[in-house]
Image (spheres, rainbow, N blue to C red):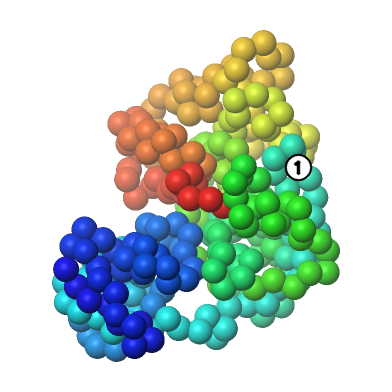
Amino acid sequence: MAQLTVNQVRYQCNADETVLDALTRSGVAVPYSCRNGICQTCVMQSSSANVPITAQNGLKPTLQAQNYFMACVCYPTEDMTITLPDNADRLLSATVTAVRQLNDDIKCVGLDCPSLQNYHAGQFINLYQDNDNTRSYSLASVPTDPYLRLHVRRMPDGRVSNWIHNELKVGDRVQISAPVGACFYVPDTPQQPLLLIGTGSGLAPLMGIIRDALNHRHFGDIYLYHGSHDVTGLYLVNELCEMTVHYSNFHYVPCVSSTNIDNRYQAGRAMDVAFVAHPHLAGWRIFLCGNPNMVTSARKKAYLAGAKMNDIYADAYLINHKR
């Protein structure tokens, strides 16, 4: 058991708890999102150098040197005095430029952020409703677009997603983080075939990755399998079909796992349809985005089908927190 001191108040952290768990259990307001050390929303700073190394994985060396760490993956072995940093110097101001309904549950949100100069299509940002409510959303845009694009799915009890769907409007000012994440296209092997599998709003980063690859004149075949339980869960179908007309190497396969579908869609789960069509994936690059169970299973299947682990990129959309 370790003792955590925040603003001169002491809190107990049990041996099986992270710093985030202990503080939120005690009623301390801490912004967080992924709980897996990926989004970096819950970054804090220790006044001493007793931070577990594993709690700093993925942080910039300059932040590591200043004893910053991610509370959601920090299991302290010693007492810690912690500062909850002011995020103002790490946040970017953005203006809502568009809010468009993509299907019954998903909206496209456009954000103009002049101070954001560089990012990779397929990365994600943290969007702040306020100091306590933050969620991660993948970028469907490419750097040459005039503004950022997010695909936001409404979650039944989601604080942030319902705020976005019900209240956010063009002209509103919001705060976002700089983009992070390693699930993006690298133009080093333009002849390599690409396989992209997504579910639900997992289409967002895949859309950005595909457009980025095509903008870089990728000439290897690109296959997108996007799945939903029923037809109403699919979106951007017409736009994707038009892309197949303009780019002969791009192939789009919308998949529906429920019964009674017409011949415009493939019957079955996107993952299953994709691996039946592509049983041998040696030399391919794979992108997996959406439901975490699908991502975990598809990653294993892709490896067993011959894909190298360093050619498999994944972005699992966690469903155990309220977006």
Whether residue 221 is visible here, answered yes or no, is no
Q: Which residue is drawn at 45% across and 70% down?
A: 30
Horizontal arrangement in the rendering, residue 215 relative to residue 3 (left or right): right
**Front residue of this view, candidates 161 and 24:** 24
State the SS at label 1: loop
Q: Mark 1 points at which residue?
A: 102
Q: Residue at x 59, y 46 (%)?
A: 157
The residue sitting at the top extreme is 260
Number of numbered callouts drawn: 1
**Quarter of image, res 120:** bottom right
Whether residue 3 is visible here, answered yes or no, is yes
The residue sitting at the right extreme is 170
- How busy is the neighbourhood of tag 1: few (under 14 within 10 Å), some, or many (20 plus)? some
**Front residue of this view, candidates 63 and 165:** 165
Horizontal arrangement in the rendering, residue 258 relative to residue 82 (left or right): right
Image x and y of residue 160, in percent:
62, 57
Image x and y of residue 61, in percent:
34, 80
Image x and y of residue 315, in percent:
47, 49
Residue type highlighted by circle 1: Leu
Image x and y of residue 318, in percent:
46, 47
Relative height, residue 198 to residue 124 (above, below): above
